[in-house]
Image (tube, coloured by chain):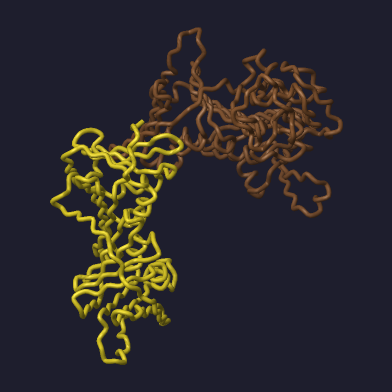
Amino acid sequence: MSFSAPPPASGEPYVLSASLDNARHLSSLLRAVHFQDHATCFATASGLRVTVEDAKCIQANAFIQAEIFQEFAVQEESVMFRINLSVLLDCLTIFGTSSLPGTSTALRMCYRGYGYPLMLFLEEGGVVTVCKINTQEPEDLLDFDFCSTKVVNKIILQSEGLREAFAELDMTSEVLQITMSPDKPYFRLSTFGNAGSAHLDYPRDSDLMEAFHCNQTQTNRYKISLLKPSTKALALSCKVSIRTDAQGFLSLQYMIRNEDGQICFVEYYCCPDENITEAEL
Amino acid sequence: MKCVIAGGNVKVLGRAVHSLSRIGDELYLEPTEKGLSLRAINSSRSAFASFLFAPLFFQLYEPGGPAPDTERFRCKVHMKSFLGVFRSLPSLDKSVGKCLILLKHRASRLVLQLHCKYGVTKTHNLAFQECERLQAVFDTQRCSSRLCAPARVLADAVVHFPPTLAEVTLGTGPGGKISLRNYVEDEAELSKTMVTELWLAEDEFQSVTVSPGSCITFCLKEFRGLLTFAETSNLLLTIHFDEPGRPVVFTLDDTVLEVHLVLATLSDLESSSLPPPTNGVSHLPTPADDFADDLESYMVALESSACEGATGGPPSPTFPLRTPRTAQSDPEEQEEEEDGAVPGTPPQKKFRSLFFGSVLTPGGPGLAPTQEVLAEDSDGEC
């Protein structure tokens, strides 16, 4: 059930207005990148991108393309603002987070422009909630300069094979070491924790491996605390692409199918850990 | 040492580790000719469990080759680390096809490698510590009472007690009935506490050989861990017990697996009637009057070498202290431990009275001059 917002008093159109029959299509993706309180929203005619960063080392982006929405209109070339993601998620899930079949929260989102709050109209079962969330000046975002031409190693795995591994990662290890190689061990995730070291090996001919393009042996370490939040995106996804460039920057792209079978993407970029690497046990 | 466990047995091993994790913080491994033995003991030395997996349990079993006259390899590993490998039992079932356990002496690592679905391999390299033999000395033949029943019968009985219940009393009643009731320490509290008692008829058991009127009280928490294992394995549980104060031994027998759980039981005697504390106590079994020494003959002293009771300091009023010096004369019964034998959560007072040396007096005995302490016990005891 969709409904139109009241016309703005000044007669100016909203720079961003969108309608979504099922708010979960938005909230579940935002949860996959929710590891910091604040996020930057960037809207163009193609859709909405929500970015979260931490420690100048990690960036996560959730893409919700315009086709997912029942209505999506952006009046300017692009609209950008910073917002409290925790509050936004609380509002989107104001009617509860349990997904009963047949019930869904309808959403209408409106933004008048710079300095104005983001307006949310949420409806479920005839009950309407109106939320106004203050927006802030957008901050500069990291540019990992990661493009497909610079990729050294790339694999695509079915998420099913990685989910349990990520959920059970030894968090007493400071780093997650990723080895990608045209030779054994092909693809290896390693941790070095209090219990000792642990290695998870995926052979190139595994049924889980959808694509294997490794040209060079690379071993890189990433702070495990930064990568751990990506487990949420992994849990939602059906496939994940893992790519590294010559400097060891990591790109994780998750393909997520929503309740209606539509495809959305979440990606994580991470800098390698600069500390000296220890000898592997 | 090298062994391979295949198929459904990986989950059995996992469940055994879960069961042992309810007992102690360290897992002792000892590969022998008879099989691989996994053991644990709790911090107050009131519970000991051992799982012996016969060579047939394994797809491949090589206990490893010291020369015939040298000591066999033994080690202990942090329980949490070992348990981490087998943490998710459902996923062991679903995705693990094989488990390899390999000892890498040169790297000082115990390797546990799980071969999973889709060709995925999980390798864990765990640090271990070499150790002395951990063995509780007990003789089930000496027990006057014996009960044998499918584990399910006892599991169904124990489910009626609240999960937080610490101790339970097992007794024999008229008509060969067996009773289970929760143990309430303070008589005064009896009127305020809910008391649960259930009776099991003799025919629920496969065999009952008991001294009439006998009853024992033991800690339920450690017993539950074993029950869970036994129930899922569909094994017969045998309970061997004797007088109060003498340990109760629970055994599970299978063609490829032997499980023992030894628990201390509450003694009837009051603290005041305990024999005066002695130092340098004998470690051979002595007549039943001195029950503290009796327990010594059952449970191994795992004294810290930093904890010398022989010189100085008032000994504890409730139990004798034992010096590691005397321990050395009987190496088979002893184990040296670097860390202090400080209990994690000491059980209630009356239980404490049964254990020697493991509960240390505040401002306890000073160190023997020959002993160098590198890191003092944080409790300040000993």
Q: Position of residue A117 (x, y in %)?
A: 36, 79
Residue drawn at 64 percent across, 26 percent down: B304
Front in this rendered view, residue B26 or B204: B26
| Outermost residue toward the left in this view | A149
What quarter of the picture does the N terminus of chain B occupy?
Answer: top left
Q: Seen in the image, is B131 located left or right of residue A158? A: right
Asked if B344 appears above or below A104 in the picture, the reply is above
Residue drawn at 30 percent across, 37 percent down: A201
Chain A color in figure: yellow
What quarter of the picture does the C terminus of chain B occupy?
Answer: top right
Residue drawn at 35 percent across, 43 percent down: A176
Asked if B105 appears above or below B165 in the picture, the reply is above
Dividing the picture into quarters, in which one does residue B371 lie? top right
Q: Position of residue A110 (x, y in %)?
A: 31, 80
Q: Seen in the image, is A197 located left or right of residue B207? A: left
Front in this rendered view, residue A64 or B185: A64
Front in this rendered view, residue B57 or B292: B292
Q: Position of residue B50 (x, y in %)?
A: 57, 28
Number of callouts in the render? 0
From where the camera sits, is residue B3 visible?
A: no
Q: Seen in the image, is B82 located left or right of residue B311? A: left
Q: Position of residue B181 (x, y in %)?
A: 73, 44
Q: Seen in the image, is A88 located left or right of residue A243? A: right
Chain B color in figure: brown
